[in-house]
Amino acid sequence: MKDYILTFIKAFLSITVLFLPIYLIQTSGEEYSYTIKKVNPDEFRLEIGREGGTLKRALSGDAKTFNPVMAQETSSTAVIGVLFNGLTKTDLKTLLPEPDLAERWERDKSGKVWRFYLRKDARWFDGKPVTADDVVFTYNEIYYNPDIPSSAKDMLIIEGKKFKVRKIDDHTVEFVIPKPFAPFLQAVGQPILPKHILKKYVDNGTFTSTWGINTPPEELIGTGPYRLVEYVVGQYAVYERNPYYYEKDSKGQKIPYITKVKAQIIGDPDVRLIKFLSGEIDYYGVRPADLPEILPKAEEKDFTVYNLGATPSTLFVVFNQNPKAPIPEYKLKWFKNKLFRQAISYAVDRQGIINIAYNGLAYPIYTAVTPANRRLFDENFYPKYPFNLKKAKEILLSIGFKEGKDGYLYDQEGHKLEFTLITNSGNKEREIIGNILKDDLRRIGIEVNFQAIDFNNLVTRLMSNYDWEAVIIGLTGSMDPYFGQNVWLSSGHLHMWYPNQKKPATEWEEEIDRLFNRAAVELDPEKRDRLYMEAFKIIGEQQPMIFIAAPEELLAVKNKLKNVFPTVWGWYKSEYVYIEE
């Protein structure tokens, strides 16, 4: 979804700070006040920086692949996102597309024919020039290849039709799209890949296993601001500035300013916190539970804590509705029942979860829209399921469950109402939520076997063998709902409850497909927003994903880093961050 693609380091938007409410922290019997700061994007001023230095950061887990087309999880995209560029990228201040590998573009009057003019100074890590052949190869032979599963493919099809991509000359590429549609320039921000390196793997059918994590870093050929030079599984990744990177600052200095990055692989957030406080990493995504420990040390350790506000990220529970899943048919019958899912939604104590797991720093949600999506967020438009265990149980009884002598509910065939709920280990918030759900559902006669497992194992279960019943997981969200099509369309690879459908399994999924397809070609912003809102209203009614909370994002940054400006969408002008020792 960048949307689901992650940038390499989280960036920031303004050096001018606004003050949020003071947090009063009790430590060792003493009260300590600290004002968490918020950046003001309207007053950002970029400084000319200095070259050099090493940025020390942390990665939350190992990559599963170095192949950007095959990467479906943040543990992979966080490692490799900085290695590649698309034709365009998004300006995180304006949220509008801007040039990247394409220095400019033009379209005809119909809005269906676009020409992109590539930068002539763009080179691959091996020094070879980026040409139109690379763009045509990437789209026609990789993204549109039926034998290569790709989440990007869902974003590059309009009403079931592909873009026509052809070479005009070495530095000009033409796209012909079936219909004009609003997010086209963002859609072509997908990574461009080197034809001279990867074509042989496409031709011999091994592309999907190409650039695995055992690939020597020097064989990974991209165009991004950094290249990977060392990767030790479970320990660290080392990056160096790409000597061929084409962007420069206003004085002609090379960027990125920081010439080396070392990223330790630290799965445990508690350990990441310790490393940040000890100076071994330069910034840290603060959990609400960390505030009592981290705020009193801000002055001594010389860092600033920012609250970036509501994020587009969502946390939810999903029940598996995939008929290919190795789970009992009677459980599939439960999970496919809208009233069953609504009953579970009523049994979720969202505000209690927010207070306990997020220290109050999150928003309750009932569909995929969060307060960060200002155009689509409307508290009164979407269905709500306020915490009500009595109502939850009444719904379950109304659809045929009966209470047994042991206090548990049983279906009409005598099967006990129980399921296994999984999440990724090491995520304290999700582990707390799992235990809260387990306890609350037990109160209405449901037995939950809650397990926390390794994240990459979790992804394998979700996306490969479908061996799961229910999961607590999240999505990073996207600037435009179009870039979530791989989740919301029934054919989508990340349509979590039942992915890759040949045709919609239900009438409501068919209607969501219809609304998303209409929105993709609707150029009137207000009409387009309304179509998306109607789709998310259906998701709120059907509850295929039982949404719980949208957390606020907190970030602690060492003050030696300059030109750092936090936004919930990522780092703004991350290549301009520099170190002042």
Image: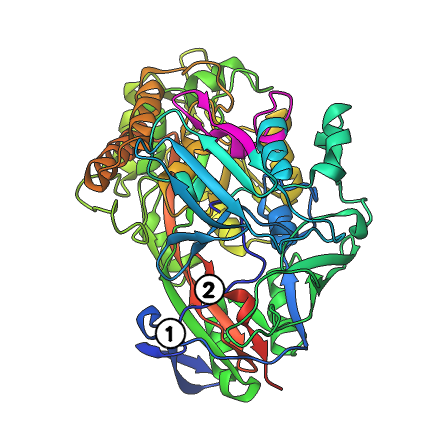
Q: Secondary structure under badge 2?
A: loop
Task: Judge left or right: residue 259 versus residue 156.
Answer: right
- Can residue 549 be seen from the camera position used here? yes
Q: Can residue 1 be seen at all in this image of the molecule?
A: no
Real-space Cα distance between discs 2 and 1? 10 Å
Foreground of the two, 293 or 305: 305
Graded by Cα atoms within 10 Å as few (under 14), some (14 to 19) or many (20 or more), the crowding at tag 2 reads: many
Q: Give the percent coordinates (x, y) of residue 352.
A: 35, 53
In percent of width and height, residue 503 lies at: 44, 14
Instruction: Residue 147: say if magenta.
Output: yes
Residue range highlighted in magenta: 142-167
Q: Which residue is mark 2?
A: 572
In this rendering, the answer to whether 206 lies above or below 134 is above
Side of 400 where 554 appears, left or right:
right
- Who comes first in sequence, dot 2 or dot 1? 1
Colouring convention used in this rendered image of the protein: rainbow
Q: Nearer the viewer, residue 413 or 434?
A: 434
Q: Which image quadrant: the C terminus?
A: bottom right
Furthest toward the left, the residue is 380
* Location of residue 569 in the rendering, given as x and y in whole percent from the top left corner: 43, 56
**Is label 2 in contact with label 1 (beta carbons under 8 Å)?**
yes
Residue 101 is situated, as x and y percent measured from the top left of the image, at 55, 50
Q: Which mark is residue 44?
A: 1
